[in-house]
């Protein structure tokens, strides 16, 4: 079986992280979230974390060189041997170019799943998003909510709100997505990458994950 590289593509709040967390278990592959990696560095307070904290808090993108280096190193880790899910990467055409080169050298053909969600739904979702600071589980206040309000179902931690989920920052992130990330889809399609569109707001997360697995298995993916 060839190595899977599933690129979960979509705007902020489209459900990339939610799907990656569901799919990594059943597909037995690694989950690479550039947002999570960068947030870990910010929390650690190391020099990279200090350099990117303000950019992330304002909703802007971190420089391509920084993110590309993190991803290149991460892909070499042993847990990526069977394959990996990219969540939040590539986000610029420059990043997509680097990824194309890295994957070609490894003989990996990526698959894109584009999660389509209306921006009004996204704004509502992100204003209600909660995350477990311990295990990373994602919840919403009105849908996909925890059994006990503000408490993680898995480990009982008190849930937190992300700094960049403030309304004005969400709007900036969506503008950045339109400007810098939407062109990535065209670039990937033009380089022959298989791309599937999945509606990301009409079903619960588990049903969407089943649909993605079906697409990978029956429509030319490698899972
Ligand atoms: P990152 O962490 O990647 O954020 P994002 O792409 O903006 O995406 P989100 O994590 O906000 O949303 P998501 O699509 O994962 O949705 P989720 O599953 O959480 O990046 C953060 C920042 O880091 C960037 O702004 C940038 O500064 C920097 N960065 C990261 N990568 C970079 C890169 N490559 N280059 C440069 N800079 C980079 O779901 C959202 C909510 O919806 C949750 O509450 C969830 O419970 C709910 N939900 C999910 N699915 C459903 C459903 N089907 N029905 C109902 N509710 C649902």
Image (tube, grey):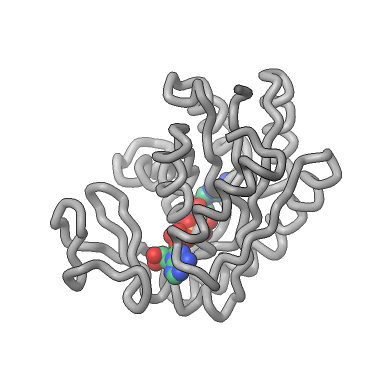
Residue 126 picture quarter: bottom left
Quarter that holds the C terminus? top right
Furthest residue in direction right, as rendered = 190
Q: Is residue 39 left or right of residue 10?
A: left
Q: Position of residue 8 (x, y in %)?
A: 58, 49
Q: Residue at x 77, y 40 (%)?
A: 193
Q: Is residue 150 left or right of residue 118?
A: left
Q: Is residue 188 left or right of residue 216?
A: right
Q: Residue at x 66, y 43 (%)?
A: 218
Depth check: give the residue in front, 91 or 201. Answer: 201
Furthest residue in direction left, as rendered = 156
Q: Residue at x 52, y 33 (%)?
A: 84
Depth check: give the residue in front, 191 or 34. Answer: 191
Depth check: give the residue in front, 184 or 82. Answer: 82
Quarter that holds the N terminus? top right
Q: Is residue 205 left or right of residue 90?
A: left
Q: Position of residue 16 (x, y in %)?
A: 51, 54
Above or below: residue 204 compared with residue 25: below
Depth check: give the residue in front, 210 or 100. Answer: 210
Q: Position of residue 78 (x, y in %)?
A: 43, 19
Q: Residue at x 74, y 52 (%)?
A: 185
Above or below: residue 133 compared with residue 120: above
């Amino acid at each position: 079986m060839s190595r899977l590289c599933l690129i979960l593509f979509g705007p902020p709040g489209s459900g990339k992280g939610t799907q990656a967390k569901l799919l990594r278990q059943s597909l037995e592959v690694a989950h690479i979230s550039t947002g999570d990696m960068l947030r870990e560095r910010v929390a650690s307070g190391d020099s990279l974390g200090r350099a990117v904290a303000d950019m992330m808090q304002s909703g802007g993108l971190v420089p391509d060189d920084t993110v590309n280096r993190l991803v290149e190193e991460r892909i070499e880790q042993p847990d990526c041997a069977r394959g990996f899910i990219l969540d939040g990467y590539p986000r610029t055409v420059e990043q997509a170019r680097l990824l194309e080169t890295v994957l070609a050298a490894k003989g990996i053909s990526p698959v894109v799943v584009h999660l389509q969600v209306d921006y009004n739904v996204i704004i509502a979702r992100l204003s209600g998003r909660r995350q477990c600071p311990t295990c990373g589980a994602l919840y919403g206040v009105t849908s996909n909510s925890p059994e006990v309000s503000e408490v993680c179902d898995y480990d009982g931690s008190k849930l937190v709100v992300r700094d960049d989920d403030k309304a004005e920052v969400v709007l900036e992130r969506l503008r950045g997505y339109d400007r810098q990330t939407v062109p990535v889809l065209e670039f990937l399609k033009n380089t022959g990458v298989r791309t599937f569109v999945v509606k990301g707001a009409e079903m619960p997360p588990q049903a969407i994950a089943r649909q993605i697995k079906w697409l990978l298995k029956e429509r030319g993916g490698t899972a």
